[in-house]
Image (cartoon, rainbow, N blue to C red):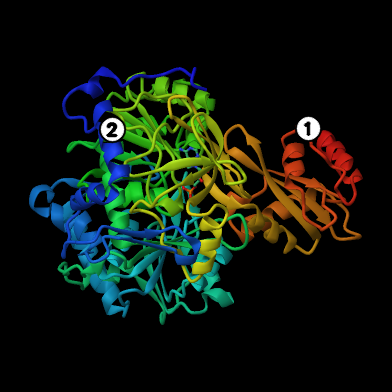
Amino acid sequence: MSEAKIYDVPAHYSAAGTRNSPEDYERRYAQSVQDPDAFWAEEGRIVDWIKPFTKVKDVSFNADDLHIRWFEDGQLNVSANCLDRHLAERGDKTAIIWEGDSPDQSRHITFRELHADVCRFANVLLRKGVKKGERVTIYMPMIPEAAVAMLACTRIGAVHSVVFGGFSPDSLAGRIEDCESTVVITADEGLRGGKSVPLKANVDNAIRTPGGAGVKTVIVVRRTGGSVNWDGSRDHWYHDLMAGESAEHQAEAMNAEDPLFILYTSGSTGKPKGVLHTTGGYLVYATSTFANIFDIREDDVYWCTADVGWVTGHSYLLYGPLSNGTTTLMFEGVPQYPDWGRIGKVVDKHQVSILYTAPTAIRAIMREGDAPTLESKRTSLRLLGSVGEPINPEAWEWYHRVVGDHRCPIVDTWWQTETGGILITPLPGATALKPGSATRPYFGVRPAILDNDGTLLEGVAEGNLVISDSWPGQMRTVYGDHQRFIDTYFKTFAGVYTTGDGAKRDADGYYWITGRVDDVLNVSGHRMGTAEVESALVSHDAVAESAVVGFPHDIKGQGIYAYVTLQAGVEPSDELRKALVAHVRREIGPIAAPDAIQWAPGLPKTRSGKIMRRILRKIAAYEFDGLGDTSTLADPSVVDNLINGRKAG
Ligand code: WTA
């Protein structure tokens, strides 16, 4: 590992204007972990406080006395930090560049214009009776109104729950029900790659289920003008509501530990959990990490390709950039539309200086060869970023050589919905890069590697990645289920935050994330619980039982492999296979669709009935050697059966 190719900090990053040199990093990192209170007291001032904090950190990772509080006696407002504080100096600067699905459509929105719209929409929400602390569900395409809606919630202290537009009505309803929201903000339709997505119709369908029954108000942005059903007692056009509202609104003073947003994410068991982030710590962490990791300069045009429905779209499309007064580009479309050169063309069109995207997108573009990308110049780029899943060295090298023209460092940023912001990452002016390694911890972050017994491993090691102390952006609870928060993250190993990822550490202290060690899949950088896909499959009449595992996939990183046992008397067929895939798409959404279904007359279970997933993962990966001891299985012959099925399929 440590012999991997090393890319030193390029000369143009050692010049003045770069935020962190190698020496700065070592010094500030040491200070940040030796005296976190002092470090974060200072860093906490990068945001504006309505009432300054006097306490910095109050944390215990002890499961019996778990608490995580940062800046707890301070008051601030996220929207005021993203908008109002920039008006004097940057009022006419572009806050959001919107690039539509079609290459002919784009818009520039200044900080002043965005501020006015957010104030108007804050007034709309208040008029609709939305109160501080109330949950508002946002189910939107990638249009500026999504940012307006999120910022307006934070402005009045409402807690937003953004649900990715690719989720099904049932998934949406489950999330609406879990956080008891009565207001949904959506659009008539989304537009991606020239195809429309029926968002309003999905909301209507969600509301028809018991989970969505509590919704009283639906606010609809007109995006495509496509026809929609309308319930006059409940549905309102965004533009009608906005037309009459004042563009003035005084941002609400929020306590640092007041809830800011909920974002549902998949765990290794059960339903998705509502990850809750709070106001002060989250904003400080998003603002600090964004500035340092992307080495932000005043004239940057920054582009993060993530959807607002994921945490990256919260911290590094919206809050981190806007809090820093950075121009952020929001892209409605997809990399392959109208052709595979789109990303480079958007970079040229808007003179993007920083591009932050996911390995799955890089691999998909790379597969088309260099030519589509080389149709653009990309001379405006100075920094590249990667997020969401491990980036294989081949994709890293291609990203560096072709997209970045050998010139741009790559920040491979490791983090999670739970962490609120990036925890392990290079800093462009400070860190020599190794393709495939997320490198070193951010300031204040204390990663450690434990073996399965919880023993701390020093030096060169491989095992479970845990974090030994809190950082301000850490999630505070699972909404409505604090016990699940404690059980999931603080019980596996005592006194530390368990990430669910495995990692190696090399002789230079660099971290290499090896992927999830639990039953969470990472499909195209999207998290999916095996349990969710299994429960969708068994909800189909033909299915008796199912076990879902990940398997290596060239583009997606991981694909979804489902073993399905049919009900007695049901015959397997290709039609049934298609029907099951369609069923999962309907139940959860297209991102959960299995890539492969194997008929399994039996599943490998222990005598106590536990499914041996380790064996299923190996068979799916076509690794038939080293299946380990199968003698403890209730019926060892099922393994041969599955291997034969795999070879035949
Ligand atoms: C994975 C996305 C390797 C990891 C921000 C983590 C990564 C999960 C990286 C969280 C990276 C994210 N290298 N793996 N740079 N970034 N992951 O919650 O398995 O959608 O636990 O947050 O993605 O996914 P989530």
> Where does the image place residue 546, in percent across and percent down from the top left?
76, 55
Any part of residue 353 in sight: no
Quadrant of res 433 = top left
Residue 402: % across, % down: 41, 21
| Foreground residue among 332 and 158 | 158
> Which residue has dot 1 on it?
626
The residue carrying mark 2 is 25
Does the beta carbon at disc 1 come under 8 Å from ligand 1?
Answer: no
Question: Could you tell me which residue is drawn at 53 percent across and 69 percent down?
Answer: 173
Please give the name of the residue rendered at 41% of the width and 45% of the height, measured from the top-left corner. 306
Q: Residues within 10 Å of mark 2 (few under 14, many from 20)?
A: some
Q: Secondary structure at mark 1?
A: loop
Q: Is residue 359 above or below residue 466?
A: above
Q: Nearer the viewer, residue 601 or 257?
A: 257
Amino acid type of the residue that numbered disc 2 sits on in the rendered structure: Tyr
- Would you say residue 247 is visible in this rendering? yes
Coordinates of residue 22 in the picture (x, y in percent): 28, 26
Residue 198 lies left or right of residue 474; in this view the side is right
Q: Where is 8 relative to 510, above or below?
A: above
